[in-house]
Image (cartoon, rainbow, N blue to C red):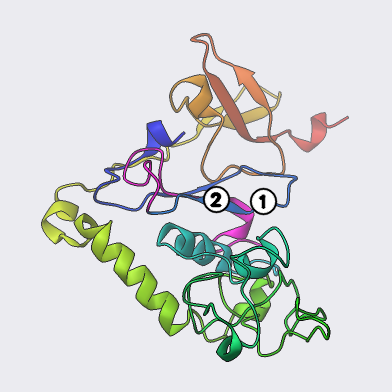
Amino acid sequence: MKAFFNVTPTTFVNHYIVNVFVGTTTLGVATFPWADEAMTAKGGVINRADSAWGAPSAEYTGVTAVHELGHALGLWHTHTGVSEVTGCSDPCLEELPLENTAMSSNVTGDLCGDTRPTPVNYQCQDPAETDCSSPSPRMFVNTPFRNPMGYADDACMDGGPGFSRDQKGRMRCYIDCFYSSWKQPALRNNAIPPTIVRAPIAINSGLGPRVTWFAPLGPAENSAFTLERSPAFTSAVTAPAGTLEYQDNSATPASTVR
């Protein structure tokens, strides 16, 4: 898909909104700026369509797209130093309280000193968990549960403080150091993205079903990804050329419904 749809990755961040990961808990993936693929067709961001902008769901208001773009600009999860380490003995453990530890939050966890340590947290409040302090574990307090790089739901993050100052600085550094070509207007103006979404084709056959589907988007492995595909009715058919076309919708006159 990326090989077919990418638009000058050295000039643009390619953000794909597609119907992938359906039926899983994965809402998106992104390529970190230090990855070898970041400025190639394999880089960019993918978001599951129902979690991106304008999703027809009260659960998702677009924060997932912001979260994944944060990764693409060099940000880690706010819970990286607690829930994405091997345990209390991990040298990369982000500890509390910050002022009494040998390692500060600028060099552990998400590498941003103004996002306090937190375990993974899906709630819009401080987590009901304790840290690794011995012999008396302590509660995590004043955690960044409304930060876009956490796991709370979109309703919690909407209207929140957004990215912290250190997170904003980190993203700006990666833009300056890795993605400087994105900031050059001359390059952007000379690489206007082509029209990608094809007009659907309507086939009418007397009183039979009317079937509308997208034209082939390329080789079979690319055609499996279509933009704005309705999740209500989707089926794959094989075209004579060997490509896969994914049906967008179907309708049958009421008089012929059985």
Q: CA distance from mark 2 to mark 1?
A: 8 Å
Q: Magenta stretch?
A: 34-57
- SS for dot 1: loop
Residue 34, numbered circle = none
Residue shown at 47%/82% (left/top)?
164
Using the image, determine if residue 91 lies above or below residue 6: below
Residue under label 2, please give it. 29
Q: Secondary structure at mark 2?
A: strand
Place of residue 145 in the rendered image (x, y in percent of width and height, measured from the top left): 65, 80
Q: Tell me where residue 182 appears, x and y as whole percent.
A: 24, 57
Judged left or right of residue 88, residue 40 is left
Question: Can you identify the residue that label 1 sits on?
Answer: 26
Task: Provide residue 210's location: percent of width, then percent of height.
Answer: 64, 29
Density class for disc 2 (Cα within 10 Å; few <14, some 14-19, many ≥20) is some
Task: Give left or right: position of 165 versus 180.
Answer: right
The residue under the point 29% across, 52% down is 12
186 relative to 100, above or below? above
